Image (spheres, helix red, strand yellow):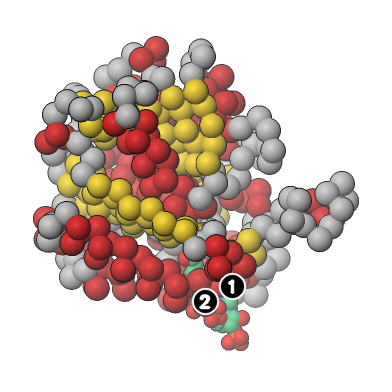
Amino acid sequence: MAYAAFRSIGAYVPEKILTNDDLAKMVDTTDEWITKRTGIKERRISKKEETTSDMGTAAAKKAIERSGLDISEIDMLICATISPDYFCMPSTATIISNKLGLANVTSFDISAACTGFVYILSIAKAFIESGMKKNVLIVGAEKLSAITDYTDRGTCILFGDGAGAAIISATENKEEAIIDIHTGADGTFSDLLMTPNGGSGSIHDALDQEGAGCFMQMKGNETFKVAVRTLTKDVVEILEDNNIESSAIKHFIPHQANLRIIKAVGDALKMKDEQVVLTVAKYGNTSGASIPMAINDIYEQGKLKKGELMLLDAFGGGLTWGSALVPFSPLK
Ligand code: ACO
């Protein structure tokens, strides 16, 4: 049987920094409020002409280079994004595929908001274990600044731009395989986090320019409570199902939405500070890109070593959630 191994990681971070003080000049907020309620100090914003696929391509190039594979060996590309280059078609994955020079490679997007990376990891694992694909490039890329309402202080303080990518490959060695992935969704909470305009569910005429503005709206406080409850339950379950103690986790890499959510889940799991990977202060919430950007951060700092066990944990609009137990298994 083929198993799926997490071979490499890459990320792209836009240069421009938007600080809390910058936001305080745009909406009625303060650095103190944002820091206390979210842990975010700054976030990255891409250039006007820079697209989600540009960022995803840059992250993918790094992941491919670090994987030790030749680009011709990649046989599938999946992109998780809620801020695609184009809302209906072509998919951002096919644009990235073209920019990378991949020929005749299955490419598609999925929409699972901040859980997107865990979802594409599970899809890659399933395709590899079934024997249908061998080397899957997964990309989480977001230009959330394009769908953020910078007059809404409840959301604009949270989000940033960036991309992360990984190569998942077939292996016969169970020791280096992804151990388990849990994913779930509950549409009864779909109104907590929405981009209500621009789609066929919109109350506006789709051709009406005003209605086509596709900004995120969020019931932050309710989302917060459901996030803590769901994430804690999900990670406890995946650890119990696999008979793994939280102390065996080298790197707990949660979705970087809010420091208070991360701390609440980390405390429930009795995680020590050195186990918890935090990038929320410098990148804010980058949705589907947040987990691979965080993995890349510890990789580039030399903290992620071969064989070390990662616990990924995400929660987002839909509502969706997911967790994964993933050893880092580079070829080189
Ligand atoms: N600056 C100052 N005051 C603010 C701001 C701001 N930026 N935003 C809201 N407030 C005010 C509110 O108006 C409210 O004032 P009131 O008491 O006079 O009515 C007060 O602060 C408290 O508002 P709450 O919304 O209750 O604040 P809360 O502590 O819940 O923090 C936050 C808000 C940061 C949004 C938090 O709820 C949160 O992080 N929620 C979860 C976000 C999340 O995890 N999303 C999931 C993933 S995102 C995705 O999938 C794309």
Residues at circles 2 and 1 in contact by the CB criterion of under 8 Å = yes
Please give the name of the residue rendered at 40% of the width and 38% of the height, measured from the top-left corner: 123
Q: Which mark is residue 133?
A: none
Give the residue pinned by disc 1: 219
Q: Is residue 69 above or below residue 316?
A: above
Dot 1 amino acid type: Lys
Give left or right: position of 109 versus 77: right
What amino acid type is highlighted by mark number 2?
A: Glu
For the C terminus, the image quarter is top left
Residue 55's place in the image compared with 225, above or below, is above
**Residue 318 at x, y percent in the picture:** 54, 59
* Above/below status of 152 relative to 50: below
Mark 1 surroundings: few (<14), some (14-19) or many (≥20) residues within 10 A: few
Determine the residue positioned at 32% across, 63% down.
Answer: 234
Q: Is residue 228 left or right of residue 43?
A: left
Residue 193 in the image: state x and y as whole percent.
59, 64
Q: Residue at x 83, y 49 (%)?
A: 206
CA gap between label 2 and label 1 equals: 6 Å
Q: Residue at x 30, y 48 (%)?
A: 181
Residue 129 lies in quadrant: top left
Q: Where does label 2 land, which residue? A: 222
Residue 331 left/right relative to 44: left
Q: Is residue 59 shown to the viewer in this render?
A: no
